[in-house]
Amino acid sequence: MAERIALITGITGQDGAYLAQLLLEKGYTVHGLRRRSSSFNTARIDHVLRDPHETGVALTLHYGDLTDSTNLIRVVQETQPTEIYNLAAQSHVAVSFETPEYTANADGLGTLRLLEAIRILGMEKRVRFYQASTSELYGLVQEVPQRETTPFYPRSPYAVAKLYAYWITVNYREAYGIHASNGILFNHESPIRGETFVTRKITRAVAAITSGVQEKLFLGNLDAKRDWGHARDYVEGMWRILQQPAPDDYVLATGETHTVREFTEKAFARAGRTIAWEGSGVDEKGIDTATGRVVVEVDPRYFRPTEVHQLLGDPTKARDRLGWRHQVSFQQLVDEMVDSDLAALRKHNVGAPT
Ligand code: NDP
Ligand code: GDR
């Protein structure tokens, strides 16, 4: 079999880490784009990184940034990938309201820069391209559940930037015959999810509160509904999308939706606590029934100027064409994340004496 070479942008992120591991297990040579940072930013992939001085190292990192086109052209030229997974992005929806121009540049134009690199290097027929599209495209929902044919209505600078990326991927496929596909992925989480996304924020707080090192968890919209799956299942779907003979766009989702409130209840329950809710709106509070203490409060600073209230995906096309289905249930996901954050706290010996 010809050598399979993958280039992953965003390799230091949650999905990049899971995808790198998957591709290494499949025998790929993997190249990853990393950003220069003033502190180490490879914690999620340290377990698969090897000393570059050894021979036969299958994973190589390259400095780069989606806002720097000459750099992208050089990295693509040097690595000669057979598959490119464009996972890099300013991926935080709330932060995109604070940094809209940067988000458009990295998430929108960054995708164009990579596609142009393929074209400039004459690699249209030699490389397959995966674009990390998102359920945020559905925003103000036009249809439930959302499928590939559901109209988009983005509700944040992040989603608008990703809308551009979605369509430029489709356009380069149609215009230049590039094997370029969009995975429209619904929320997926894991123990290595970024700490400021709501699931990980909750599971870290549950561990800290039940260990006696934090008093309260402040959240925004408790009624938001998301279709949450496990990142490990979703990177398998990304890979399957690129193995298809023809490029296409696919929804990856679980087909179940849950509120932020429900995630919070289940996470506390995993740590042996029951939450009772009192009040409503910004006055809503979550009380630990064992201690009578308020452990969850609503803080309007976490409300978004425009919210995506409800997402529920229909993964039928991925199931029928890719044979893909999520494996990890909502309950298993919550349990794994809480257990991992509890174990991390214990490992560092943090917590009240028992
Ligand atoms: P993360 O935020 O965990 O990772 C983002 C990655 O992109 C990091 O490696 C980050 O580097 C890198 N990055 C950010 N900006 C730039 C830039 N300008 N140039 C180069 N690299 C950059 O995201 P996830 O792993 O969760 O998501 C992966 C992709 O999938 C993203 O594009 C996201 O928008 C999209 N997506 C995610 C979903 C989810 O539920 N997780 C659902 C649907 C889509 P650093 O480590 O230095 O910050
Ligand atoms: P999302 O994820 O915006 O769906 O984007 P996030 O976990 O940030 O928010 C989910 C929902 O929870 C509500 N929420 C809070 N969110 C955060 N971050 N912090 C809080 O305190 C809080 N309280 C309530 C939010 O309002 C929202 O409704 C993620 C990212 O990974 C994107 O990159 C990806 O494209 C989409 O998922 C699919």
Image (cartoon, rainbow, N blue to C red):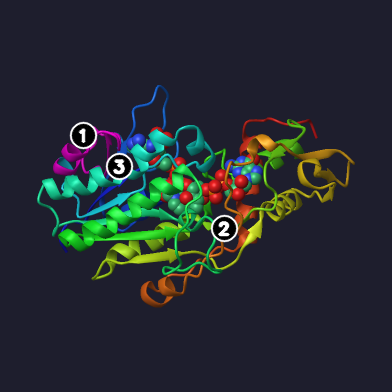
Earlier sequence position, callout 2 versus callout 1:
1
Q: Would you say residue 13 is visible in this rendering? A: no
Q: Residues within 10 Å of mark 1 (few under 14, many from 20)?
A: some
From the image, tell me which residue sits under label 1.
71
Figure quadrant of residue 177: bottom left
Q: Position of residue 218 (x, y in %)?
A: 71, 37
Disc 2 versus disc 3: distance between alpha carbons?
Answer: 28 Å
Residue 23 in picture, x, y percent from top left: 32, 54
Pair 1/3: label in front:
3
Of residues 323 and 171, the one nearer the viewer is 171
Q: Which mark is residue 109?
A: 3
Question: How crowded is the residue under tag 3: few (<14 C-alpha within 10 Å), some, or many (20+)?
Answer: many
Q: What element does badge 2 sit on?
A: loop
Q: Residue at x 76, y 35 (%)?
A: 216
Q: Residues within 10 Å of mark 2 (few under 14, many from 20)?
A: many
- Say left or right for 139 vs 276: left
- Amino acid tagged 2: Trp
Q: Which residues are magenta?
A: 52-77
Mark 1 or mark 3: name the one nearer the start of the chain. Answer: 1
Image x and y of residue 250, in percent: 39, 66
Q: Which residue is mark 2?
A: 228
Circles 1 and 3, Cβ within 8 Å, touching? The answer is no
* Number of numbered discs overlaid on the protein picture: 3
Visible residue check, residue 115: yes
